[in-house]
Amino acid sequence: MITHRLHVKENRPVAFSEATLKKVRELIQQYPEGKQKSALLPVLHMAQEELGGYLSVDVMDYVASLLQLNPIEVFEVATFYSMFYLEPVGKYVIEVCRTAPCAICGGEEILEYLKEKLQIGVGETTPDGLFTLKTVECLGGCGYAPVLQVNTQFHEQLDQVAIDRLLDTLRKQAADPSSADLTWASQFC
Amino acid sequence: MGKPVLLEHIRIPGIRQFGVYRSHGGYRPVEKALLEMSPTEVGQEVTRSGLRGRGGAGFPTGLKWSFLNRKSDKPRYLVCNADESEPGTFKDRYLMEHLPHRLVEGLIVSSYALGVNTCYIYIRGEFKYLVRILEHAIREAKENGFLGERILGTDFSLEIHLHPGAGAYICGEETALLESLEGKRGNPRIKPPYPAYKGLYDCPTVVNNVETLAAVGPIINMGGEAYAGLGKGKSTGTKLISACGHINRPGVYEIEMGLPVEEFIFSDEYCNGIRSGRHLKAVIPGGSSVPVLPADLILRTAKNEKRLLTYESLEEGGFDSGSMLGSGGFIVYDETACMVRNTLNLTRFYRHESCGQCSPCREGTGWMEKVLWRIEHGEGRWKDIDLLVNIARHIEGNTICPFGDAAAWPVASAIRHFREEFEYHVEYPDEVRVITHGNLVRETRFTGGHPVSGIRFR
Ligand SMILES: Cc1cc2nc3c(=O)[nH]c(=O)nc-3n(C[C@H](O)[C@H](O)[C@H](O)COP(=O)(O)O)c2cc1C
Ligand code: SF4
Ligand code: FES
């Protein structure tokens, strides 16, 4: 269980693009009539991705209005799941697995090394807003330990050299948005 | 191991594509079931196969299906549990990544048997790339007439939808999963009523693991009896074991049930022995929630019989000297591993993932973590060890869902089998402190083996 600081509503206008709204409408169709609340988790994922990287109170209230829910229904869900961020995060969220199978195969060293390299602690963001460092529980990649995720990309069998390379790549990618984005999706589909 | 069953085609290039999968006999089980068999016959075939749930509990799948309330006039649902978050378990991910059509095919046949027209795959949110792979597979199946309205010209229709979670281990528990699918917090429900009567949206629902459902296709293909001919006793068929930790070849292996644990760990066909020429110290054989066993007890039971990879053999000896097959998350430790540190790590995991509904679980996991932290950091007291046993005992069996047991067992079993390590930490706090707060706290801590439990290594 995690306890979060409550945020103040800023009343900034937030809204999905027309394309995303269409996706939301399709999504609601997946569930029986009147059960649009089921779409909450996927819609919160979209909101986090499209509306600023984290779920501000304004964003949560917007999602509530889209799905005809009470704001509290959205808030209690957003606070339950670890993939939803209630605080602003950097462009790249580095989440290091710290559960036993990774921890015994070098995961603890990887985390220390990242802290040192980025000069931040767990839960903090680098001053340039590029990286946020977090720890997560088992990512389902224990055989390829140590594992971390950058946003939703898996990086496995890491060592210090691989971390150096990864951070370099991400920095370059951030500086040049047109550079090829080597995601899992582009490898597989 | 004879011929693989689930992973038969995994090495074929392009097998993720419908056309390639189809040309290797893919979707034949769907044709066979829908065109030649009645839903009841499909169910009977699964019962005959002896297939047991691969999600952890090992409940017979045919029996579970037979409980589904068919009298209700509400719609029925099949929910595929792809939440895979039990530490040490990464087999469903492997299966979905490489053979997505194996799952889709299994879902169609299972839905037909259950009279289900809507099926949801609840997939853990972190597996975003898998969502894309599965979406692709579902779209292909639909384009080829295996999903949608009136499949293969029969009057059976089916839609499969993907639903991502958002990072919560407890959503793997079936009722928490259903809550989450309804857009709520993942708080497990009190059972009964069971999902077979009141599941998703209060409708009759079957929840099955990915691997369970993926096995249905091959079962229909080869016949239940042939499937039951594989394996040993009541552990029929094959099982995916995801092996990790201090072994030379971690990965996902399909084994025929009944394979000796010793062969699995040391044979070059599987784990290929312990890393860096070290010794085997301990194994958690079924995902972090099952009891840990020291080397001597994982290789042979207390009765000095060979320990096999079956539900029964791993349970042999009960809590005194046995464990469980669980989800097949096989975590191996060599002599550098510290059992106190490892137990602290796992307890932190359970404290973090508790949904917080029941006080024994919510408070107990936090309390155990605090005590373990003390011991690990050289601040432990003698009575702490019994205190841990006591807390674990009071969590076990006193909670809404089995998560409480899952949190208690790792602690109780670590103390049962490695008590001298806990005592060492209390007796030599200075040494423990130096080691823990030294430069390299971690894997290299006990490079020469843990100072006390060396005798039990192999
Ligand atoms: C705390 C907890 C976590 C669980 N996590 C999973 C999981 O990640 N995947 C899974 O398939 N089953 C998981 N289960 C088991 C499910 O509750 C359920 O028994 C299973 O999905 C049934 O499918 P099966 O009969 O095919 O095994 C979990 C159970 C508990 C108590
Ligand atoms: S046992 Fe733990 S996880 Fe399960 S319902 Fe109770 S508090 Fe929640
Ligand atoms: S423990 Fe790190 S991925 Fe499972």
Image (cartoon, coloured by chain):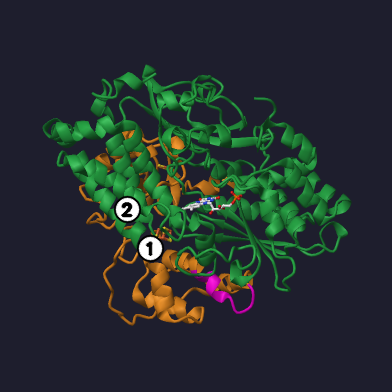
Chain colours: A orange, B green
Drawn side of residue B167 relative to residue B212, left or right: left
Other residues around mark 1 within 10 Å, as few (<14) / some (14–19) / many (≥20): some
Residue B62 coordinates in the image, percent (x, y): 70, 50
Is residue B77 inside the magenta stretch?
no
Residue B438 coordinates in the image, percent (x, y): 15, 33
Task: Decide which of B187, A158 is in the foreground and name it.
Answer: B187
Identity of the residue drawn at 56% across and 28% down: B308
Check mark 1 vs ligand 2: CB closer than 8 Å? yes or no. yes
Ligand 2, by image quadrant, is: bottom left
Identity of the residue drawn at 60% across and 79% down: A34
* Residue labelled with disc 1: B358
- What span is colored magenta in the figure? A32-40
Mark 1, chain letter?
Answer: B
Task: Decide which of B431, B165 is in the foreground and name it.
Answer: B431
**What's the distance in space between the residues labelled 2 and 1, CA to CA?**
11 Å
Task: Decide which of B314, A159 is in the foreground and name it.
Answer: B314
First in residue order: circle 2 vs circle 1: 1
* Residue labelled with disc 2: B365
Image quarter of residue B258: top right
Secondary element at tag 1: loop
Quarter of the picture holding the N terminus of chain A: bottom left
Please say whether residue B442 is visible from this viewpoint: no
Identity of the residue drawn at 78% across and 37% down: B225
Q: Does residue A28 lie above or below B433 as drawn?
A: below
Q: Amino acid at mark 2?
A: Thr
Check mark 2 vs ligand 2: CB closer than 8 Å? yes or no. yes
